């Protein structure tokens, strides 16, 4: 039975921040459910989808209450666009989760294609006698010591979307952990008291099916990048970034077309063509996420600008997006992202680099041919070999505390100030 929803006097900023956090968590959980073949993780996505439906209704109510003139309507239109985009992401990830819950069918080898695209995410149930039971995330020093982050906790019927240093792990909590496989293994044992056994899927055997699955993985990477860049566009009111989102969405559309052709060819070569249904669902839902990214940045693209409440919501969300310049003589001046271990050392992922002085160097990107070659000013999704220099502008995403560490790397040392 549908939950009754009524107006509540809540801040639009808080509602938008919560919707952003939930939408990003749902993307992580839905693909991880496919990778792990986990009904429990997929059910968590569907629970969050129900929560998102309530949030988007309440946000629309609050926006209707705030609009009293044509100027208000024009200013709030981009906010409504972001609400609609979050709803699309929620629906799309819910459809991905249903592939597992409803056993729609996926090629077993699909899980072989995903690990390279998904940082390991697991669901760990806190055992009463486990090493970390009763400890706080700050006391455990989880992220600094292991690189593993607790991105959400399910406690009974309650979701803790922003666990912080003071959040204690209570027995029977379901903790969703994200991080490198090496770190996950030890943390999982310390939380559950059990050994973590990652999936060991078979290798793909049909060439066309292999290409189709690779296309879905690339679509996923590009769609997630599009969402990140879209929030960056509205946060910094950047038309350049908004245009990058549109370009990525066009690439995803092209990949979708090629995916369909490869899947139809593969259907003639597999023993059970019906097993490809879930793959089709996965690709279609991924393309919807890409469309939603464009919807987030549409206000900037159409000259409506970005309402201040959007920027404040992004700043208050679980993962922040920051823009900073590489200063002369800093640790990043003349370094590569991989050589300086930026992601490992700071916890921030650099999603784009803007060259301001010299020509852009070749970088690993989400597409080696069509995407990287089309970027003149921005290096999108830079890889470990991407070189940095004074004057470069970094766009990065990660936890609030990690942003300070990245800022320290990009700034001058205390001795040089």
Image: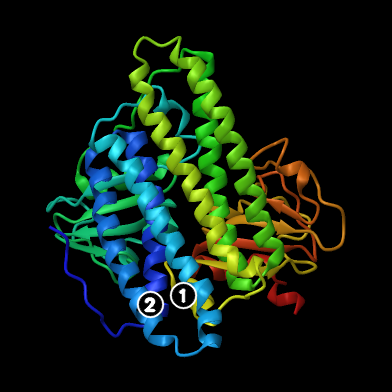
Rendered view: 194 above or below 79: above
Furthest-right residue in view? 358
Taking 207 as reference, is 101 left or right?
Answer: left
Indicate the quadrant containing the C terminus: top left, top right, bottom left or bottom right.
bottom right
Q: In this view, does 51 lie to the left or right of 374?
A: left
Where does the image place residue 171, in percent across and percent down from the top left?
A: 14, 57
- Does residue 367 sit above or below 171 in this rendering? above
Could you tell me which residue is drawn at 65 percent across and 68 percent down?
302
Colouring style: rainbow
Give percent across and percent down for residue 278.
36, 30
Q: Is residue 215 among the parts visible in the rendering?
A: yes
Q: Mark 1 vs mark 2: which is more N-terminal?
A: 2
| Residue most extreme to the bottom | 68
SS of the residue under disc 1: helix
Q: Residue 51 carries which label?
A: none
Return the x and y of residue 5 as percentages of the image width and height.
21, 72
Query: Quadrant of residue 272 in the image?
Result: top left
What is the quadrant of the N terminus in the image? bottom left
Which residue bears the numbered disc 2?
14
Compute the Cα span from label 1 to label 2: 6 Å
* Neighbourhood count class around disc 1 (C-alpha, 10 Å): few under 14, some 14–19, many 20 upward: many
Q: What residue do we see at 69% from left, 66% from top? A: 239
**Is residue 107 visible in this depiction of the protein?**
no
Residue 366 or 343: which is nearer the viewer?
A: 366
Judge whether 64 appears above or below 238 on screen.
below
Q: How crowded is mark 2: few (under 14 residues within 10 Å), some or many (20 or more)?
A: some
Q: Which of the 4 image quarters holds residue 324?
A: bottom right
Q: Nearer the viewer, residue 154 or 59?
A: 59
Q: Where is residue 320 in the image (x, y as percent from the top left)?
A: 51, 67
Q: In this view, does 326 lie above or below 190?
A: below
**Dots 1, 2 in contact, CB < 8 A:** yes
Say which mark, if any, is on residue 313: 1
């Amino acid at each position: 039975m549908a939950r009754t929803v009524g107006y509540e006097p809540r801040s639009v900023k808080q509602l938008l921040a919560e919707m952003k956090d939930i939408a990003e968590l749902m993307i992580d959980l839905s693909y991880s459910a496919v990778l792990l073949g986990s009904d429990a993780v997929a059910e968590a996505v569907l629970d969050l989808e129900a929560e998102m439906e309530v949030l988007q209704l309440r946000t629309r109510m609050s926006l209707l209450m705030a609009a009293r003139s044509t100027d208000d309507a024009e200013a709030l239109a981009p906010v409504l666009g972001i609400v609609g985009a979050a709803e699309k992401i929620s629906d799309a990830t819910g459809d991905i989760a249903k592939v597992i819950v409803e056993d729609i069918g996926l090629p077993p080898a699909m899980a072989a294609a995903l690990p390279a695209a998904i940082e390991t995410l697991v669901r760990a149930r806190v055992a009463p006698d486990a090493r970390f039971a009763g400890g706080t995330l700050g006391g455990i020093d989880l992220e600094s010591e292991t690189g593993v982050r607790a991105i959400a906790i399910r406690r009974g019927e309650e979701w803790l979307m922003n666990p912080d240093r003071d959040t204690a792990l209570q027995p029977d909590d379901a903790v969703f952990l994200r991080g490198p496989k090496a770190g996950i293994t030890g943390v999982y044992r310390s939380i559950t008291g059990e050994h973590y056994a990652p999936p060991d899927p078979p290798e793909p055997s049909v060439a066309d099916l292999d290409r189709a699955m690779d296309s879905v993985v690339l679509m996923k990477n590009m769609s997630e990048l599009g969402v990140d860049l879209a929030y960056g566009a509205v946060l910094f009111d950047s038309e350049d970034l908004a245009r990058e989102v549109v370009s990525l969405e066009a690439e995803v559309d092209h990949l979708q077309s090629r995916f369909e052709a490869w899947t139809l060819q593969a259907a003639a070569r597999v023993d059970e063509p019906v097993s490809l249904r879930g793959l089709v669902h996965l690709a279609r839902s991924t393309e919807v996420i890409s469309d939603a990214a464009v919807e987030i940045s549409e206000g900037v693209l159409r000259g409506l600008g970005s309402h201040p409440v959007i920027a404040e919501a992004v700043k208050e969300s679980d993962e922040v997006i920051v823009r900073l310049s590489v200063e002369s003589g800093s640790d990043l001046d003349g370094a590569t992202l991989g050589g300086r271990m930026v992601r490992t050392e700071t916890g921030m992922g650099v999603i784009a680099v803007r060259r301001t002085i010299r020509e852009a160097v070749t970088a690993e990107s989400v597409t080696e041919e069509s995407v990287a070659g089309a970027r003149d000013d921005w290096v999108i999704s830079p890889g470990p070999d991407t070189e940095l220099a004074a004057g470069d502008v970094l766009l990065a995403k990660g936890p609030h505390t990690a942003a300070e560490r990245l800022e320290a790397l990009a700034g001058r040392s205390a001795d040089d100030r």
